[in-house]
Image: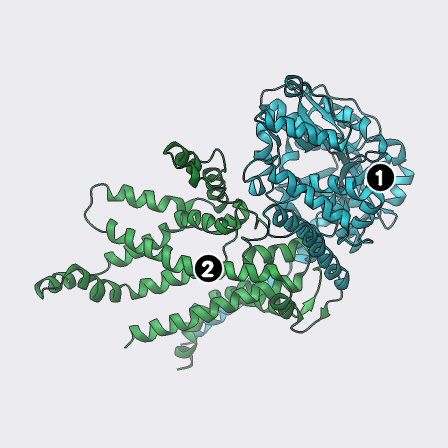
Chain colours: A cyan, B green
Amino acid sequence: MGKKRLIFLLAITMVLVVVLSACSSKEGSDKASSASDTGETTISLWVLNDQAAYLKPILESFQKDNPTIHVEATYYGTDPLKESLKVAASSKTLPTMWFTWGGSLGAFYPENGLTMDLTETAASHKWSDIYNSAALDMVKYDNKTSGIPFHVASLGMFYPKELYAKLNLNPPTSFAEFEQQMGKIKESGITPLAVGGKGGWDVMRLTEQLLEHFAGPELHDKLNALEASWADPAVEKSFEKLKEWSDKNYFEKGFITLDPLEAETPLYQKERAYALTGPWIDTNISGAGNAPDSFGVFKFPNDQPKVRMSSFTEMFQISGSADGKEQEAAVKLGEYITGPDIVNKYIDQYGAPALKEFTFSKQSPHTSEMAGMIGDGSFLISDQALPQAVVQKLFEAQDAVVLGEWTPAQAGQEIQKAVETYKSGN
Amino acid sequence: MKIKYWKPWTFVLPALVAYLIVIVAPSLYTLRLSFFSWNGIAADKKFVGIKNYTYLLTEDAVFRVALRNNILWMAGSLTVIIGLGLMFALLLNRRLKGRSVFRSIFYFPYVLSGIIVALMWTWLYHPTKGFFNVILQQIGLSQLTHPWLADPKTALAAVFVAAVWQGVGLPMVLFLAGLQSIPRDCYEAAIIDGAKPRQSFRYITIPLLSETFVVVFATTLVNAMKVYDIIYGMTAGGPAQSTQVLSSWMYYQTFKFNNIGVGSAISWVLVLITMIIIIPYVYYTNKKSHL
């Protein structure tokens, strides 16, 4: 009887030990960070899978140059990264440094006091001499620098030069001319626009340029800042035009749920005329066996005196709760990854860097061309400019208008309702 | 006497502790969160009572679409997936040549991840180059070609067909195991008594599969209520939110819009619906089997 009681007590004790040890992770992490007392620092970094090709060798060379800093990189898909960051933020387990997008996506972390304020670092390290001013502006929240600029990209209309030559066309200089060209291309048996509606963001690129055309830059900026009503006639006209293009079959049949990348693929084979996208398309064109310079690019002709392009930024943010030594190491790593030496070395795979000056890649000729095009200014891409709940309503409105479930006027009203719901909750 | 009382608890305790920590505690915490307005980070959570629930039921049109879709999905799963699973199990329980191969073929889709299935079926449904529309064109039925995933009227059904293809293997395997545990004597006695195959099925197979039905019903119901990856992969909830389900809308509310309270409320609506159906069913079948 006594033996059985002993076994029972041992079992209970073991369960309690397991439970209590699971609750003692903080103490465990304190022990792990004590490695910093030996002069070594370990920093965790969360980035995207599709950046691994160039980030892996960059991280290796960084650690060679900085043997006392260990970088533990974790690679995620786009949505898993967003999700993991939110979970980590709410459980106070954010990595030392992470990749994120600008606008409303990246603003969540500084708005909630989770990021390191890099304003002083930016001034003392003279970032204004290194990064372009648009990039530096886009990583600021409440006038504080909250991220290390990584990429800045703008969107232009890409077209196959061969198709244009065959139809005797030149890049359009006005909205009317662009529409005429789409009509001509459709008559020749080619679907003009390579757009995939799944996820909403690819159609949004056209919608926001239609807004720029019909609303003008001032109202467009106010709409994005939620300072003007979306039930405006200019918004209605934009949706009317989207519906008109859909009804004229300027998009592929069933485009509304096509994956954007899948929808873009026929463009590489010259089976579509236009894609509103960024210079990273060069890599896709090369991958499909074509020369990137066989494609041209022009700014979406929105008929404004200064033709603004949609643009967005990507950055590295650093945890505000990491200790000073880890933050210092993270800044060093961020500046290393985004600095001119590394950018120029990996420019073929790097994308559009946020630097003032860099060596242009022959494999990505449009990066330099588009960097020159942005001189007239840009507006922040809608899915970063607007709160995410409003973005989702915008995507729903696009689909509903194209499918004839909402009128263009109703689309504007529904978005405005979402804006008001968002405002009332904040 | 005391030890006799406590002994079973010592065996159950480790699993019970794990269950309480991993399932019960987070669920109750989520229930608590559903009464707050919170972005997941801010130090202050604002208590709003049942406002998140009333918002969902009275103001959130997408929630109502998602709820309707979940109910349709659940009804379809409980009839089509269980029905087909039972049918395949009955067929493959017979002495057929190559039945092991067929069992593997029918079970194989179940081991694939939802995203892989979503990718495959998205291609099959491609509006211009997809298998279904190309076949329809080639047999002269081009008027029946359709953008299956792009039309709100057909999108959910199209995704459901893919889910049936993937999901039918699990009930089939469970029913097969149940069928093989039924003694042959029962059928032989029924034949001697002059029972027809249909009567054997009605009065022997179905009653003796009742335990299996409980497991199949519960797993199919739970899988139907938590459906997410195949919908996210094939339509991302579109077009125009027409294929949103509760799990996907919970994801959007929680991780995209930072409305932790609303997301938590959706998850508890899911739990409640599942409980309302599953508890009476399990109670009834258990009671019946112990009569």
Quadrant, the C terminus of chain B: bottom left
Q: Residues within 10 Å of mark 2 (few under 14, many from 20)?
A: some
**Residue A136: numbered disc:** 1
Q: Is residue A250 above or below residue A326?
A: above
Q: Amino acid at mark 1?
A: Leu
Q: Residue B239: x and y, percent? A: 57, 48
What residue would you read off at disc 2?
B72
Q: Amino acid at mark 2?
A: Leu
Element at label 1: helix
The reply to whether dot 1 and dot 2 touch (C-beta < 8 Å) is no
Residue A126, quarter of picture: top right
The residue most toward the left is: B192
The residue lying at 46 percent from left, 47 percent from top is: B158
The residue most toward the bottom is: B1
Q: Between residue B17 and residue B116, name the one nearer to us.
A: B116
**Residue B164: numbered disc:** none
Which chain letter goes with mark 2? B
Counting the numbered discs, the total is 2
